[in-house]
Image (cartoon, rainbow, N blue to C red):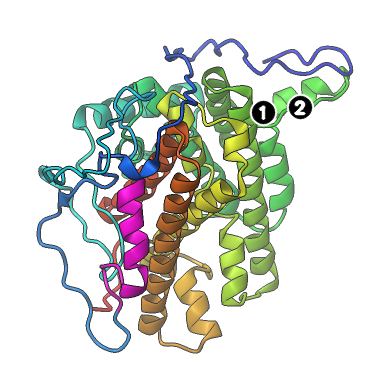
Amino acid sequence: MPDSGPLGSSLPERRPTPPAAVPDALTPTVSDLSVTPTALHFLAALHPPVTIPDPPPPPTGASAVRNTPDTDTDAADSVLQRILRGPTGPGTASLSLAGRHRPPPPDPVPAAQPAAGRAVPGLYYHPVPEPDPVRVEEVSRRIKRWAEDEVQLYPEEWEGQFDGLSVGRYMVACHPDAPTVDHLMLATRLMVAENAVDDCYCEDHGGSPVGLGGRLLLAHTALDHVHTTAEYAPAWQESLTSDAPRRAYRSAMDYFVRAATDSQADRYRHDMARLHMGYLAEAAWAETGHVPEVWEYLAMRQFNNFRPCPTITDTVGGYELPADLHARPDMQRVIALAGNATTIVNDLYSYTKELDSPGRHLNLPVVIAEREQLSERDAYLKAVEVHNELQHAFEAAAADLAEACPLPTVLRFLRGVAAWVDGNHDWHRTNTYRYTLPDFW
């Protein structure tokens, strides 16, 4: 374990690899700040057409929602297609400008032997190509070895649940521009560590709202180190190996800070603090039996959501979105909307799983049903509409930012966040081990 040093010194951020770890060979971080003439002339499609065989028919009736943009958002979608057409590789090598002439649309990318699972009827989403099976297999192999050998994440009887997470497919789909498997592993370890904290502290495997704040704070110190006296530092250091969530946080963050810039690492810590604050709000409601108003629930979900995942898309892509660009209010709006939309996707796909679990689980359909006195079906369909509005708002905000700040690095980051949103939905759609849809159609 790292030595804390004398009073007032800080723990080194870029520590040696733990003895059991296999170091990643990462490419250097690249920052490209050259300016293109205008974002309007990017020629590569943001969402290549993908064929998903036998799509389910949309629901009918007064409460039905549609899986296509409505007339109020056609303009925003059109702007997005004209603007958010960013590079597919590092830097600007793959940028192509052609004045005012738009090329024909790209050929559809076939979804070869698509995984099982169907989308929520009426949900607005973008299909993705099947993730590279070679990368999926390698990420799956490496993450299981890490979980078992480096951090002793789970007992043998939980192995099936770990395999059912299908995290290799998840991360490959979410980060199509990752230059290497080593880069993908940065996101994969963090994702698995976050799930371990959620499951073991909050949810299925011994979690409880009682005392959650103390557990989360101590786990957070694996990400954001304690700077204390020489007398008390060893006890804190020993605590980082005391349970699986803290071991996972510590190891995953060790890998991440060696690949990330200081700014990227601090950005991630900040977003994880947001996540933990959201956990605490939900736990407080559980302890008091409070069912929040719909707007209160959505406010909580802006913090208890997937935000830490897409916000590291540049680190996983091998480049950096500079801190001043990441901190722009319009960029923060894009990232927040992306996290909000993807989290409602989780509410919709995990709805029946949570209803079948012990205790009461808050999700958007449940809150809408109680607070707005709707049937389960109508509440679920309204939650689909909420998602669709958030997804359209995300795309419109991204298009506005791309037009206002057409730097290649900004455009690539926006494209990466959009890819994460799409990949996150695809994982939920295809993960039939974890999710089944309600019988509302």
What is the quadrant of residue 229 in the picture? top right
Q: Relative to 21, does residue 227 appear above or below in the rendering?
A: below
User: Which portion, as a residue range, is magenta?
Assistant: 65-84
Image coordinates for residue 173, horizontal then vertical, percent: 30, 40
Q: Which numbered tag is attached to residue 236? A: 2
Say which residue appears at 66% left-offset and 28% top-offset. 240
Left or right: where 102 falls relative to 247? left
User: Is residue 70 located in the magenta-colored stretch of the structure?
Assistant: yes
Image coordinates for residue 83, horizontal then vertical, percent: 36, 47
Residue type highlighted by circle 1: Leu
Q: Relative to 284, does residue 65 appear above or below in the rendering?
A: below
Q: In the current view of this chain or complex, which residue is farthest to the front?
A: 100
Image quadrant in which the C terminus is located? bottom left
Residue type highlighted by circle 2: Trp
Do we see residue 336 in this rendering?
Answer: yes
User: Is residue 308 located in the magenta-colored stretch of the structure?
Assistant: no
Disc 1, disc 2: CB below 8 Å? Answer: yes
* Chief secondary structure of the magenta portion: helix
Label 1 belongs to which residue?
A: 240
Q: Relative to 372, does residue 230 appear above or below in the rendering?
A: above
